[in-house]
Image (cartoon, rainbow, N blue to C red):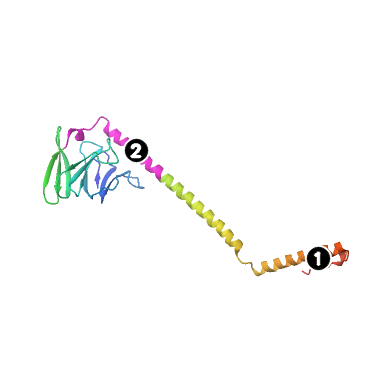
Amino acid sequence: MQRSPFFKDILLSVGGWTLALWKEGVSSGPILESSACNVKLSCAAWSPTRPGVFFVAKVDGSVDVWDLLDKTHEPALTQNVSPTAIAQIYPFQVTQKQQLIAVGDIAGTLHILEIPWSLRQATPNETTSVANYIEREVKRRAFVVERWNFREKEKREIEAETKKKAGGMAAAMAPPTEEEKELRLRQAYEAYLNEEHNFLRELGIVQDEDIPLPAA
């Protein structure tokens, strides 16, 4: 993991098949993460003169050059350097007009390459442009996390409501207690007596005072 020489709270990491840019204080994840490469990455280094450029070495012996002002989803270019895996890279400024990058592979061979002018000379306001990009990514990350949390909360509320309804249905379908059985029988018996009374009264067989009240 390497800290940016221009932004002290920005770190570059490589691991496995992906690289990531991290910002201190943002704990929800990287502000930039590459898609999986077809070969493993071995190491990375920032450009000493351009805030938006960094170099990533791979085990197939090539070096990817990333330029955030050009592309943020893939390398700007790839340079084949060695037939074996690269173990370490180190870019350094020789003079104001010359910048080199030292590339060491696992066979012990040191390769020295010159960085072209376009990748060593910072563009006007590049630091500001990269800072704005970082800020946008931080806000985008915060928005994604906020939406994710909202969706998770909404999902939990729906699940709770579903369980509540299921619990109510289960309670309604639960077998009645002895007290409930006795109450239902009493209500049914009283309803039967009322119907019988009405029927006998319509026939003129009994009067209202002839029908006894049901026993308590």
Looking at the rendering, in which quadrant would you find the C terminus? bottom right
**Relative to 211, is 156 above or below?**
above
Does residue 117 belong to the magenta stretch? yes
Residue type, numbered disc 2:
Glu
Question: Residue 167 in the image: x percent, y percent?
Answer: 56, 59
Residue located at (61% from left, 61% from top) = 172
Task: Identify the residue under disc 1.
Answer: 196
Q: Secondary structure at mark 2?
A: helix
Residue located at (35% from left, 40% from top) = 137
Task: Identify the residue under disc 2.
Answer: 135
Residue type, numbered disc 1:
Glu
Q: Is residue 5 left or right of residue 99?
A: right
Residue 47: name its quadrant: top left
Q: Secondary structure at mark 1?
A: helix
Stretch in magenta? 115-144
Residue 174: name its quadrant: bottom right
Is the residue marked by circle 2 packed among few (<14), some (14-19), or many (20+) residues within 10 Å?
Answer: some
The reply to whether dot 1 and dot 2 touch (C-beta < 8 Å) is no
Mark nearer the N terminus (1 vs 2): 2
Residue located at (45% from left, 48% from top) = 151
Question: Residue 3 in the image: x percent, y percent?
Answer: 25, 44
Mark 1 or 2, closer to the camera: 1
Residue located at (64% from left, 68% from top) = 177
**Relative to 157, is 75 above or below?**
above
Nearest the eye: 11 or 177:
177
Q: Is residue 101 left or right of residue 134?
A: left
